[in-house]
Amino acid sequence: MTREDSVSRGDSVPREDKITAVLSALRRSKFRSRFNIHGKYSEYVRAKGMDTVRSHAVDFISARIAPADPDNDGKQTPMKNHPVFIAQHGTGTCCRGCLQKWHKIPKGRALDESEIGYIVDLVMTWIEREMDLV
C-alpha cells in the first residue's frame, strides 16, 4: 500500500474501503443524508464533466479547508451554488470541525497532499453516486 492509498497519517485502511465505510456512516446521519445532487447541480455536473468538477474540488478544498486555521472556519463552505459545496456538506468535509468529527483529521495543522486527495476522492465518489441516482 502506498501513502496515497491511506486515508490519513498512520491509517492502514485502503482509501477505497475507507470511502465506502464513511459514506455508509454518513447515510445514517439525518443531517448529512439530506444533501443531494439534483436540478441545476446535476445539470452542471453533466455539462462540465467530472474532470472539471474534480478540478474545482481540488481548488476549493486546497483554498478553504486545507490551511491549519482556515478563514471563517465552520462557515467557509456555502450550502448551495456548486455541486462540490453540496458534496462537502454531504460528506462531512465542509469545515475542520467536521473533518475532525467524521474523518479523524485533527484541527490546527495544514492538511497534507494525501489528506487533500482523500477528501477530493470522497467528494467525487459522493457526487458520482448521486449522479447515478438522478
Image (spheres, rainbow, N blue to C red):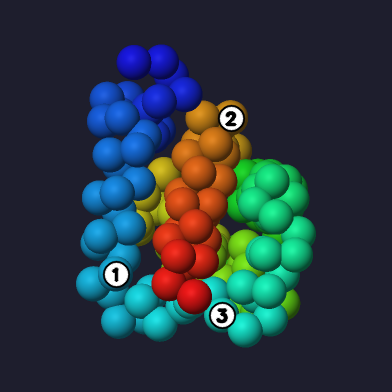
Instruction: Give me the residue at 38% from left, 74% from top.
Output: 32
Cα–Cα gap, marks 2 and 3: 30 Å
Q: Earlier in the sequence, mark 1 or mark 2?
A: 1
Report crowding for label 1: few under 14, some 14 to 19, many 20 or more residues within 10 A (C-alpha). Answer: some
Lower sequence index among marks 2 and 3: 3
Within-10-Å neighbours for mark 2: few <14, some 14–19, many 20+: some
**Tag 1: residue type?**
Arg
Q: From the viewer's perspective, is the residue at label 1 or at label 2 nearer?
A: 1
Q: Secondary structure at mark 1?
A: helix
Element on which disc 3 rests: loop
Marks 2, 3: nearer the viewer: 3
Q: Which mark is residue 38?
A: 3
Query: As rendered, which of 54 and 114 lies closer to the eye?
Result: 54
Residue that mark 2 sits on: 113
Residue at which label 1 appears: 27
Question: Could you tell me which residue is drawn at 51 percent across and 30 percent down?
Answer: 114
